């Protein structure tokens, strides 16, 4: 299974979880071939090598990084550096290797880090929940 296919599968799983948890997520396009002049412009605009594939944001500004890899995929040097800095900053950072099914306990564990993000009613999931 290709990394892009795995990422699509993870995104679909995350979308379903938004019915039960308050969070948002996004993907930073950070790969592909570009003309040299455009790449230099993107770097000046803040493009960073090694940025994780998916960034999840939970209430109170808490974040989680998800790096998606094919089953035999390996982190690049810049991805390893990003992971090290995430550890220093104490930002949760997970590597998803293979299918959602193979990583279900990891993905469920990510959501379990934020019990207060669990939706307790039928209210709009992006609105603060009352106790």
Image (spheres, rainbow, N blue to C red):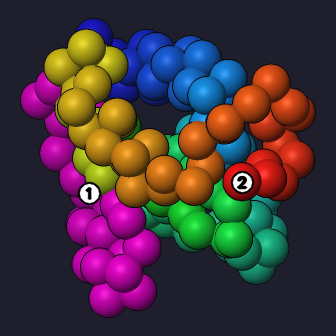
Could you tell me residue 17's position as x and y percent? 57, 25
Q: Earlier in the sequence, mark 2 or mark 1?
A: 1
Q: Return the x and y of residue 103 as percentages of the image width and height.
A: 23, 27
**Left or right: 46 in relation to 98:** right
Q: Is residue 129 magenta?
A: no
Q: Residue furthest front?
A: 131
Q: Please state, as top left, top right, bottom left or bottom right, where the N terminus lies in the image.
A: top left
Horizontal and vertical percent position of residue 51: 50, 61
Q: Which numbered dot is residue 76?
A: 1
* Labelled disc at residue 99: none
Q: Residue at x 49, y 55 (%)?
A: 114
Instruction: Locate the C terminus and report the quarter of the image it occupies.
Output: bottom right
**Residue drawn 29% across the image and 79% down it:** 87
As displayed, is residue 108 above or below residue 126?
A: above
Q: Nearer the viewer, residue 109 or 70?
A: 109
Dividing the picture into quarters, in which one does residue 123 lie?
Answer: top right
Viewer-nearest residue: 119 or 62: 119
Q: Position of residue 5 (x, y in %)?
A: 43, 14
Q: Circle 2 sits on which residue?
A: 131
Q: Which residues are magenta?
A: 69-93
Would residue 127 appear left or right of 59 to someone viewing this image?
right
**Relative to 108, is 51 above or below?**
below
Residue 11 in sight in this render: no
Q: Residue at x 38, y 19 (%)?
A: 6
Classify mark 1: helix, strand or loop.
loop
Q: Is residue 36 left or right of residue 41?
A: left
Q: Is residue 91 magenta?
A: yes
Depth check, front residue: 35 or 117 = 117
The residue lying at 69 percent from left, 61 percent from top is 59
């Amino acid at each position: 299974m290709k990394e892009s296919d795995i990422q699509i599968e993870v995104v679909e799983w995350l979308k379903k979880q938004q019915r039960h948890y308050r969070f948002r997520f996004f993907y930073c396009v950070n790969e592909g071939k570009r003309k040299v002049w455009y790449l230099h412009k993107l770097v000046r605009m803040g493009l960073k090598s090694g940025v994780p594939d998916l960034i999840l944001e939970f209430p109170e500004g808490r974040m989680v990084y998800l790096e998606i890899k094919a089953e035999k995929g390996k982190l690049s040097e810049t991805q390893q550096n990003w992971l090290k800095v995430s550890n220093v900053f104490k930002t949760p950072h997970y590597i998803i290797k293979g299918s959602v099914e193979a990583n279900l306990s990891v993905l469920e564990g990510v959501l379990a880090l934020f019990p207060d993000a669990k939706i307790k009613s039928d209210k709009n999931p992006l609105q603060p929940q009352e106790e």
